[in-house]
Image (cartoon, helix red, strand yellow):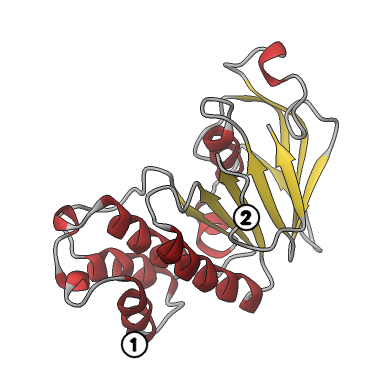
């Protein structure tokens, strides 16, 4: 699958605000499965909006987004449930976790929809990223950095052709970020998926095929 953006622009931003962007207002920008893209911009320049547009959770844009598969081409607006369940996974900047559930339950509730990982796989991933015992604690008792690690594991518990990561290392020290990055890279390569990662910091923790600026 490929994702093609045509003349895309947030409807709430002016043309002057996106002038010089490698993505916004470009006649055609294509993201290809199997490649890794780093998208850099300062705060407020449309990074989160871009991923929300692709995910279909924000339709306030001008232009078009096309999903090209070997058998079909389609674009929004459309029912997004199957697209999100099988083709797109998203690590949200605000994490979108359930604070009253444990770390383990937050991941299991996603995996119950996809059946992508075994219980042993999930526990091993959480054990690799969290201090002992934390996976059984309510999420509200965990630090912001620990919650971000839980959200990363949850995003990997489904089949996907594109993985969207919105500033995924923003609350992590560099050593922990490297552990999370390795786990992400392993899953992306195992699924021969594409990676779209937004960041304020252009210092890469992962190998990228292209760096784009908004």
Please identify the residue farthest to the bottom as the structure is shown.
120
Q: Which residue is drawn at 66% across and 15% down?
A: 17
Q: In which quarter of the image is residue 113?
A: bottom left
**Could you tell me which residue is drawn at 19 percent across and 70 percent down?**
134
Outermost residue to the right: 27
Labelled disc at residue 32? none
**Relative to 120, residue 198 above or below:** above
Residue 161, x across and y down, in percent: 64, 64
Residue found at x 38% / y 77%: 125
Of residues 54 and 75, the one drawn nearer to the viewer in this rendering:
54
Q: In this view, does 25 lie to the left or right of 113?
A: right
Q: In this view, does 4 lie above or below 102?
A: above
Q: Do the residues labelled 2 and 1 touch (CB within 8 Å)?
A: no
Residue in front for this viewpoint, 5 or 15: 15
Q: Mark 2 points at which residue?
A: 204
Q: Position of residue 144 (x, y in %)?
A: 28, 51
Quadrant in the picture for the C terminus: top right
């Amino acid at each position: 699958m490929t994702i093609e953006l045509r003349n895309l622009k947030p409807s709430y931003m002016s043309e002057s605000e996106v002038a010089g962007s490698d993505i916004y207002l470009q006649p055609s920008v294509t993201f290809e499965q199997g490649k890794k893209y780093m998208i850099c911009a300062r705060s407020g320049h449309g990074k989160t909006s871009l991923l929300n547009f692709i995910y279909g959770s924000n339709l306030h844009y001008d232009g078009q987004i096309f999903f090209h598969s070997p058998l079909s081409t389609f674009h929004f607006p459309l029912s997004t449930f199957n697209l999100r369940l099988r083709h797109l996974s998203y690590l949200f900047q605000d994490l979108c976790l359930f604070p009253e559930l444990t770390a383990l339950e937050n991941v299991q509730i996603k995996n119950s929809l996809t059946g992508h990982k075994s219980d042993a796989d999930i526990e091993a991933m959480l054990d690799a990223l969290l201090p002992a015992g934390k996976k059984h604690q309510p999420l509200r008792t965990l630090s912001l950095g620990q919650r971000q690690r839980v959200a990363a594991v949850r995003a990997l518990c489904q089949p996907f052709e594109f993985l969207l990561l919105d500033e995924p290392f923003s609350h992590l020290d560099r050593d922990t970020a490297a552990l999370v990055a390795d786990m992400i890279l392993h899953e992306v390569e195992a699924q021969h998926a594409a990676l779209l990662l937004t960041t304020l910091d252009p210092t890469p923790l992962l190998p990228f095929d292209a760096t784009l600026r908004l």
